[in-house]
Image: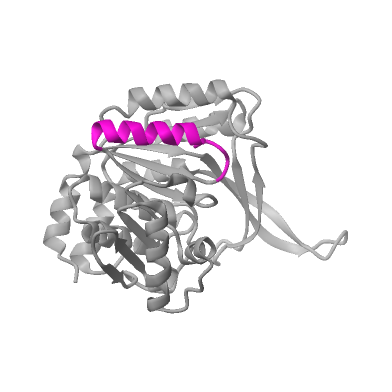
Amino acid sequence: MLDSARLQTVIDRFPAKSVVVVGDLIADEYLYGKPARISREAPVLILRFTQREARLGGAANASHNVHALGARVTPIGVVGRDAAGKEMIALLRSAGIPTDGVLVEPGRPTPVKTRIMAGGYRSTRQQVVRLDREPPAAPEPATEDALIRRLATLGARADAILISDYGYGAVPPRLFQEVQALAKRTGAIVTVDSRYDLPRFRGATALTPNEPEVEQLTGMSVDDEPSLEKAGRQLLDRLEARYLLVTRGSRGIALMEGEGGTTLIPIFGSDEIADVTGAGDTVISAFTVGLASGAAPVEAAQLANVAGGIVVMKRGTATVSRRELLDALNHGQP
């Protein structure tokens, strides 16, 4: 059961908290087109271009979500000296997010995910294809050194450090070691969302895999709640973490505590999801800010679940505001 009054007290503390987000800053590009005809060149649909939209993705989306929830946020990452990098910095500034921790590395392309969306003006626009432009390698050693210096300066007073790893190399091992050392000195919590290499972040406060990732990392099938419990506990021990927050799609969230039990939280709102793009960023952001604000782990998980239930009803990469979270708690629905 949600204790709305208690959760609202936690949310009231959000503006006093500071979160540093370290990770892969990604530009999410949307190209919209209206179906016109079938091409004579190949059996493909021709779309008549209608508009382009750019949004903050990856660690930038996690930062945007922390900011929307009312906490202070500082993203630390790297972009290229290209059009996408310039647009990324402009979008962050436009949202009111500081860019002191964003480094520019000449010659390194900014990660861009381009989604081609097809649909009429009054119909639902469907994603036809996604084109990813990725940096070929990790940041240069000089950039890595600079990221570590920015972390030491900008993260000295952070209540939490959120790692958003999309596999583009912006969180090299030495940088994560510095995150752990800083957290040990300051008492900050460390939360991690990693798509490709979760075991590398052993020792974090909390990690947020989804069910398929739990299966992949443990080699165990997760077909029901007992198998989820068994696999999740094995992973929790292996990662030496305090908490494991497993996202389960339409089945909600499971929280496993190293020194406690397992709590299964059903999905908040409707299971007729509109779009899951970036939902994991919203979940870890709400969970992190909740923990930093003094919420019990289960309370932070409930807030993350509510935030996730709101954001999947929005189209495209999106955020959940503090006001939306409060309204959802008051009315019991997104």
Point out residue 255 in the picture as x, y percentages from the top left corner: 31, 63
Q: Is residue 285 visible?
A: yes
Q: Quadrant of the N terminus?
A: bottom left
Query: Is 120 on the left or on the right of 225, as rendered?
Result: right
Q: Residue furthest right?
A: 41
Q: Is residue 14 magenta?
A: no
Point out residue 66 in the picture as x, y percentages from the top left corner: 33, 44
Q: How many marks?
A: 0
Above-or-below relation of 67 to 224: above
Q: Is residue 247 visible?
A: no
Above-or-below relation of 255 to 130: below
The residues colored magenta run: 167-187
Corner quadrant of residue 179: top left
Q: Residue at x 43, y 55 (%)?
A: 280
Q: Is residue 169 magenta?
A: yes
Q: Residue at x 17, y 48 (%)?
A: 294
Q: Main secondary structure of the magenta part?
A: helix
Corner quadrant of residue 68: top left
Q: Residue at x 19, y 67 (%)?
A: 2
Point out residue 281 in the picture as x, y percentages from the top left corner: 42, 51
Point out residue 164 in the picture as x, y percentages from the top left corner: 45, 44
Q: Nearer the viewer, residue 37 or 115?
A: 115
Q: Nearer the viewer, residue 263 or 46?
A: 263
Q: How is the image coloured?
A: one colour
Above-or-below relation of 123 to 73: below
Q: Quadrant of the C terminus?
A: bottom left
